[in-house]
Amino acid sequence: MGNQIKTGLLLGLLTVFVVMMGGVLGGRNGAVMGLVLAFGMNFFGYWFSDKVVLSMYGAKEVTERDEPRLYAIVGELAATAGLPMPKVYVIPRNSPNAFATGRNPEHAAVAVTAGLLELMNAEELKGVLAHELSHVHNRDILIGTIAATLAGAVTFAAQMARWGAIFGGGRNDDERGGFLGVILMSILAPIAALLIQMAVSRSREYLADETGARFAGSPDGLASALAKLGGASQRVPLDASPATAHMFIVNPLSAGGMANLFSTHPPLEDRIARLTGRSFSSPQGPGRPDREAEAKPRSSAEGFWDRMS
């Protein structure tokens, strides 16, 4: 029920942004047109946003014959989680990453990049896919997909408003709110949309890691996969839209500047630490266990289940 409320709030907030932008650009008539557009966007986002996101990245649906290892792992995990078998897609990109989409478990899809399939061993791939199916199980995918579609639309409209103001769109100050109003709205709207995505996404990543470890039977595969993805995704960044970045298992954008400021994911070090029980603030440096932990040769799986119990 909580995610349904969040979905409604998300749609409502993004609707307000569209109406406000319509008012800035066209006064009262613009606000009415913005409201009509927002209702259309909400309807389209609910029913078709998954197809939009998949097509954005050229994802191709695969069968068991095409990708037997991938298909078998997804099928095994779906059975463990008590979920219907989702559609499986491969994105022809070298950057390793993955996401899940769809409006509910009955209409879910899991997409992985070709780079991920090449980089991961069977245990790591299982960990990644378990994480993505956790988003399906926890009903996160509708929120994330709608956020991606609507935030992308808001960002695009803001860009159009900015260029329209620069080239004379704000001449009628009384009706349109003035040149400065258009510029301000075109800057603030995409920032607000990204902040909404952050609020939706960050806490859910920790929960998906935890649930995914349970589905996989161990946190080790996912922890190892996240460690690999941290470096590989930065060496080979994905040409991704910031509006969809929150959907991926790790941030697909190259690090630095605004990408860090508006990161939709918790730090990888924190996520791995929660899975493995290792300290990332020890004198030995980030990503290495402290000496006290080294003196206790317990498996990361044992520690994880103790912490979760």
Image: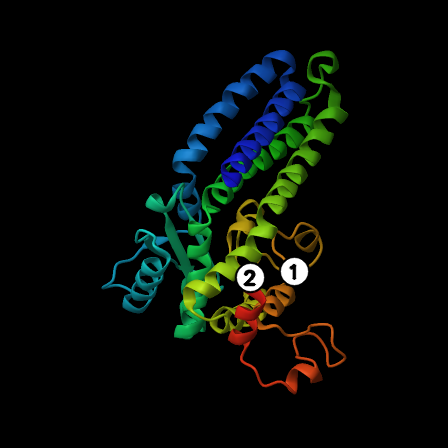
Tell me the crowding category of disc 2: few under 14, some 14 to 19, or many 20 or more residues within 10 angstroms, Cα based: some
Tell me the crowding category of disc 1: few under 14, some 14 to 19, or many 20 or more residues within 10 angstroms, Cα based: some
Q: In the shown orientation, is residue 293 left or right of residue 109?
A: right
Q: Is residue 252 visible?
A: no
* Callout 2 secondary element: loop
Q: Type of residue at label 2? A: Pro
C-alpha separation, residue under disc 2 versus residue under disc 1:
9 Å
Residue drawn at the location 62% of the way across and 28% of the way down = 17
Q: In the shown orientation, is residue 13 left or right of residue 219?
A: right
* Direction left: furthest residue: 65
Above-or-below relation of 305 to 106 = below
Contact (Cβ within 8 Å) of mark 2 with mark 1: no
Give the mark, 2 or 1, whose residue is nearer the N terminus. Answer: 2
Residue named by callout 1 = 255
Residue drawn at the location 58% of the way across and 86% of the way down = 297
In the rendered view, how is the structure colored? rainbow
Q: Is residue 211 visible?
A: yes
Q: Which image quadrant for residue 53?
A: top left
Residue drawn at the location 49% of the way across and 36% of the way down = 4
Q: Position of residue 271 (x, y in %)?
A: 60, 64
Q: Position of residue 109 (x, y in %)?
A: 37, 50
How many callouts does the rendering have? 2
Q: In the shown orientation, is residue 172 left or right of residue 247?
A: right
Q: Type of residue at label 1? A: Ala
* Callout 1 secondary element: loop
Residue named by callout 2 = 237
Residue situated in front as seen by the camera: 148 or 163 = 148
Residue drawn at the location 72% of the way across and 18% of the way down = 177
